[in-house]
């Protein structure tokens, strides 16, 4: 699983949250480098839209056939208990383990639409895989993990579609955390770097739950 | 070499489906793009029974409102002291009203809601229940969901007063009123009793109410105390119940509970003297 | 499974070969070394180049951390970089996980055989200093190379 880092990029390409989860990732990169990195990702995202192959542009049907629904994958990033009652006991209802304003034992239980229809969703490299989740408002959540998948249940999965779905589920929950702990913070100014210690803590908790 | 500027707005939008996710130059969309072809799912809210619904307010909505209130006060205040005083003032008004409201609601006999519900369901089939209420007509207009709601009959007269035989006696002892705050008021406001009620071992006029996860401020990171709103409610409540006091909030993390908040209540000296005179030391 | 286009870039950021199929049903359709795709080639190169700079910055040790594939809404880009600075880029549909072996085969069995071993083909496609920064226009026009590549990729187009 080993999540290496998490970025939140606002709709104009500015980096508003950056967190590395393994100490050595930070070598030689200062905050300015990360700002540049975020803008590059944002830019590539826009370019990707322009690059749609002609074959896809010509055949309307094949591009319409693509299903952007992301299925719900249970309990990604949630506390894992043996039974669902144990899970809910330690998950949502216990005050210290509470991750947000949702009821029940998970943020959501339905499949959802992906808003990232023409941009980069997954970037595979030799050392890590990066996933990008875009919200309807253009906010981007980026996660890089050392293995190909974020799924704790299926750590050796090489099915790319499945991996993207798991990551989308995970990042959507980070988005839920964002809407709870950043948007509801009266001292946060929009589009500015996130300083909330609570958000920090909850993100860490969720990342730890993946292992 | 020709320089063509990339214009994201002139992307493949026209060629493809009308929705292509987020469009950079347009900004957030006003309506859901998949609205048109999605079949509308009827909301459950219309088929839900009004009577058995738990009276709950959306936490998110409440948190947003509270957040905006904090931000407004914060902009307007000159110092931390000023900020806390203003926030306290906002809560104070709620507290003073709660004394009346909660005492009245607690005076409603516990079996009232049950009988009125059956009254509503059976729809004037049982005359005896109507009689027992001493109310007029068939009773079909009685809207009742839980005991803590105001009840009106069709003719507009308040029915709640009719069912209260004895008003709940006023709390006179310090411990009684604190129990009321700890239990009844907390449950009314936050849906659960507060986590602890402690008497200070150092000063005899100090009491502490402990909340492990304050409902209103749970999304606000530590740093500035926004719990003075709750302080204001407590203070307003106790003041109007003739227990003048000062209340302050203190963040006291304990183990896993790092949002644990302690509300310190300092009663005025004469409250203690009165308590001693009346109930003995 | 379908492939949409295939590109080769040299170490001077020049596109030295491009092939784009326009009809999935017809493997002979589309363009080879077309002028019209010049802009697309630049965008494609630019995007991979910037993403590559991101991943190399994030590399944990000094070994190059190359981009393998990029999944984009409707399609997927597969890249293969050789030690000599050549990039082989293939655009496929979004379902296919990896075309690394295909790109490797194209390099080792087709490119090396018909371009590198061909004494008449230029060693460097940028003929002078002015063409080393993406301004180059020379392409691989070798008929043997093209026909062999076509034969190899044709079965994949409409799978």
Image: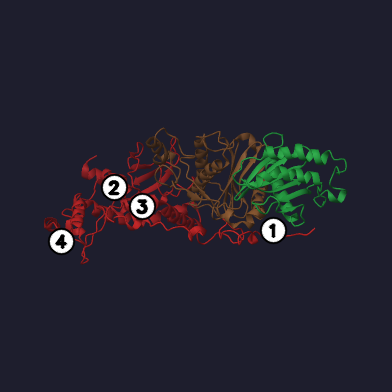
Judge the density around disc 3: few (<14), some (14-19), many (≥20) Cα neighbours within 10 Å.
many
Q: Circle 3 sits in a helix, a strand or a loop, which is it?
A: helix
Give how far apart the Cα atoms at labels 3 and 4 are.
Answer: 35 Å
Quadrant of res B116: bottom left
Residue at mark 2: B184
Give how far apart the Cα atoms at labels 1 and 3 are.
Answer: 57 Å
Judge the density around disc 1: few (<14), some (14-19), many (≥20) Cα neighbours within 10 Å.
few
Judge the density around disc 2: few (<14), some (14-19), many (≥20) Cα neighbours within 10 Å.
some
Judge the density around disc 4: few (<14), some (14-19), many (≥20) Cα neighbours within 10 Å.
some
> Relative to the observer, which residue lies in front, B129 or A109?
A109
Q: Residue at x 24, y 43 (%)?
A: B276
Pinpoint residue A58: horizontal percent, then vertical percent. 64, 57
Of pointers 3 and 4, the one earlier in the residue sequence: 4
Of pointers 2 and 1, the one earlier in the residue sequence: 1
Quadrant of res A158: top right
Colour used to depict chain B in the structure image: red
Q: Which mark is residue B135?
A: 4
Residue at mark 3: B233
Q: Residue at x 28, y 52 (%)?
A: B52
Q: Residue at x 63, y 38 (%)?
A: A128
Give how far apart the Cα atoms at labels 3 and 2 are.
Answer: 13 Å
């Amino acid at each position: 699983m080993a999540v290496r880092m998490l970025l939140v990029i606002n709709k104009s390409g500015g980096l508003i949250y950056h967190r590395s989860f393994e100490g050595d990732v930070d070598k030689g990169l200062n905050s300015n480098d990360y700002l540049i990195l975020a803008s590059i990702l944002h830019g590539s995202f826009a370019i990707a839209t322009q690059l749609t192959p002609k074959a896809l542009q010509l055949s309307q049907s094949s591009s319409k056939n693509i299903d952007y629904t992301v299925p719900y994958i249970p309990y990604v990033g949630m506390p894992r208990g043996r039974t669902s009652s144990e899970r809910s006991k330690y998950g949502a209802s216990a005050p210290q383990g509470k991750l947000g304003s949702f009821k029940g034992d998970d943020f959501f239980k339905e499949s959802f639409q992906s808003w990232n229809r023409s941009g980069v969703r997954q970037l595979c490299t030799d050392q890590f895989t990066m996933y990008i989740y875009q919200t309807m408002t253009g906010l981007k959540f980026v996660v890089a993990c050392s293995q190909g998948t974020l799924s704790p249940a299926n750590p050796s999965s090489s099915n790319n579609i499945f991996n993207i779905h798991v990551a989308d589920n995970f990042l959507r929950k980070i988005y839920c955390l964002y809407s709870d702990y950043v948007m509801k913070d009266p001292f946060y100014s929009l589009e500015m770097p996130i300083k909330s210690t609570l958000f920090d803590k909850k993100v860490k908790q969720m990342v730890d739950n993946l292992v | 070499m020709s320089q063509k500027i990339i214009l994201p707005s002139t992307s493949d939008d026209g060629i493809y489906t009308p929705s292509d996710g987020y469009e950079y130059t347009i900004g957030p969309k006003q309506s859901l793009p998949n609205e048109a072809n999605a079949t509308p799912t009827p909301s459950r809210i219309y088929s839900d029974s009004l009577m058995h619904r738990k009276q709950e307010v959306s936490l998110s909505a409440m948190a947003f409102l509270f957040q905006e209130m904090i931000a407004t006060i914060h902009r307007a205040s000159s110092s931390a002291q000023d900020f806390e005083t203003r926030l306290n003032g906002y809560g104070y008004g709620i507290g003073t009203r709660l004394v009346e409201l909660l005492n009245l609601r607690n005076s409603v006999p516990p079996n009232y809601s049950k009988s009125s519900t059956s009254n509503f369901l059976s729809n004037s089939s049982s005359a005896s229940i109507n009689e027992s209420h001493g109310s007029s007509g068939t009773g079909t207009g009685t809207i009742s969901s839980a005991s803590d709601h105001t009840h009106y009959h069709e003719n507009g007269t308040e029915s709640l007063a009719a069912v209260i035989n004895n008003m709940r006696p006023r709390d006179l002892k310090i411990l009684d009123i604190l129990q009321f705050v700890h239990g009844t008021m907390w449950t009314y406001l936050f849906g659960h009793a507060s986590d602890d009620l402690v008497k200070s071992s150092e000063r005899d006029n100090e009491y502490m109410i402990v909340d492990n996860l304050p409902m209103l401020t749970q999304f606000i990171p530590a740093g500035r105390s926004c719990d003075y709103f709750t302080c204001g409610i407590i203070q307003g409540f106790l003041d109007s119940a003739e227990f003048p006091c000062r209340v302050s909030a203190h963040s006291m993390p304990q183990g896993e509970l790092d949002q644990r908040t302690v509300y310190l209540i300092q009663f005025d000296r004469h409250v203690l003297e009165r308590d001693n005179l009346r109930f003995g030391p | 499974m379908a492939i949409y286009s295939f590109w080769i870039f040299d170490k001077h950021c020049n596109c030295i070969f491009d092939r784009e199929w326009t009809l999935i049903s017809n493997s002979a359709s589309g363009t080879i070394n077309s002028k019209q795709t010049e802009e697309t080639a630049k965008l494609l190169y630019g995007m991979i180049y910037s993403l590559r700079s991101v991943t190399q910055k994030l590399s944990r040790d000094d070994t190059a951390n190359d981009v393998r594939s990029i999944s984009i809404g409707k399609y997927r880009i597969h890249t293969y970089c050789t030690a000599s600075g050549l990039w082989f880029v293939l655009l496929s549909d979004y379902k296919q996980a990896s075309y690394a072996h295909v790109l490797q085969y194209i390099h080792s069995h087709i490119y090396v055989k018909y371009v590198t071993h061909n004494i008449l083909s230029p060693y460097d496609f940028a003929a002078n200093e002015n063409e080393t920064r993406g301004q180059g226009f020379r392409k691989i026009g070798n008929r043997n190379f093209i026909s062999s590549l076509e034969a190899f990729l044709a079965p994949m187009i409409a799978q």
